[in-house]
Amino acid sequence: MMTLQRNSIASRPPEQVTVAGTGVTYRKVGNGRPLLLIHGWGGSSRHWLSTMANLADIRTIYALDLPGFGDSQPLAGVASAECLANVVIEFADMLGVERFDLNGHSFGAGVAAYLAARWPTRVQNLMLTSFSIPRTAIERVLFAQMHQQMGLTLALWQPWLTAWQPWINVWQPWLALQWTTPPLPRLIASRFFYRTPAEDELLREGVADLVQMDWRTALESAASLGDPAIIGALSQIHAPTLIVAGRYDLIMPPSGTEIAAQITPNCRLAWIDRCGHVPMVEQPEAYHQALRDFLSQANAA
């Protein structure tokens, strides 16, 4: 049962802690076992506001802005999925959270999978939302080659990206103004939903997060999507796992979601009908009921 309202959580000033030498912003609500939430590429902790409202009665929830996203400062080093997983563990250490449930969305699900495989004693239950992997051996080779090539290219372009950053900082407010002006938010969001939500404010928030992210972080994290280590991590996960996905996800192909569920031990797959890439926004009741059922069963185990 929802005990809080989304807007009441949104209105609370977020907190901040220094992790890996950078300021990491986060939101905290609820009571019970700790639950960490990792947003997707181009997102922020605001993507989880309805989830925090829905599950606050059964979990103490921490939703962080990954470095370079939302209101968190970028890392000085490379923002790969591996590095961001290290940040999440350090974040938990800073807050004294030893063992926790974990939920990651899209790119954040890859970070969560890597974390769960590398630190199996820390993750009690794992949820991967809107997550997919290459479907065939050929696709995996192609993604691995793309990951390697993008990594090399970004390393060569690093000095230029650093030099351009002040100019990018000047452009971002203008871009934010343009991209969040109707009808652009609805046009941009249309690919992410089966049926685009009627609430314009939700769409503007999502587009604002997309524009606000640090560009170097955006490129480096996008490059890690093809990292073979993420795919390899799935078979090494020990925690009970739930994968939740929309049947009409155009960003993470459902056929690849089925492969991910087959590879992951002790894994359940929950489909949400008439839903795209952002189920916590498009189908919040079905999505949060799937999480609540999974966590309730975990409590009873």
Image (cartoon, rainbow, N blue to C red):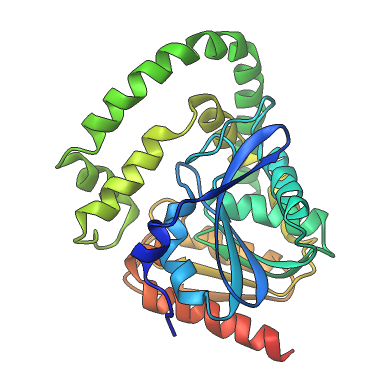
Compared with residue 258, is residue 166 higher up or lower down, i.e. above or below?
above
Q: Residue furthest left?
A: 183
Q: Residue furthest front?
A: 13
| Residue at 27% in and 46% down | 204
- Percent position of residue 184, x then y: 20, 39
Q: Is residue 200 visible?
A: yes
Give the quadrant of the N terminus: bottom left
- Percent position of residue 300, x then y: 70, 91
| Residue at 48% in and 26% down | 215
- Percent position of residue 7, x then y: 34, 63
- Position of residue 185 in the picture relative to residue 159 (left or right): left
Give the quadrant of the C terminus: bottom right
Compared with residue 85, is residue 73 higher up or lower down, i.e. above or below?
above
Which of the pair 109/135 is nearer the observer?
A: 109
Q: Residue furthest bottom?
A: 300
Number of numbered tags placed on the structure image:
0
Which of the pair 281/15 is nearer the observer?
A: 15
Which of the pair 194/124 is nearer the observer?
A: 124
Q: Is residue 134 visible?
A: no
| Residue at 49% in and 15% down | 165
- Percent position of residue 84, x then y: 67, 42
State which quadrant residue 61 falls in.
bottom right
- Position of residue 53 in the picture relative to residue 162 (left or right): left
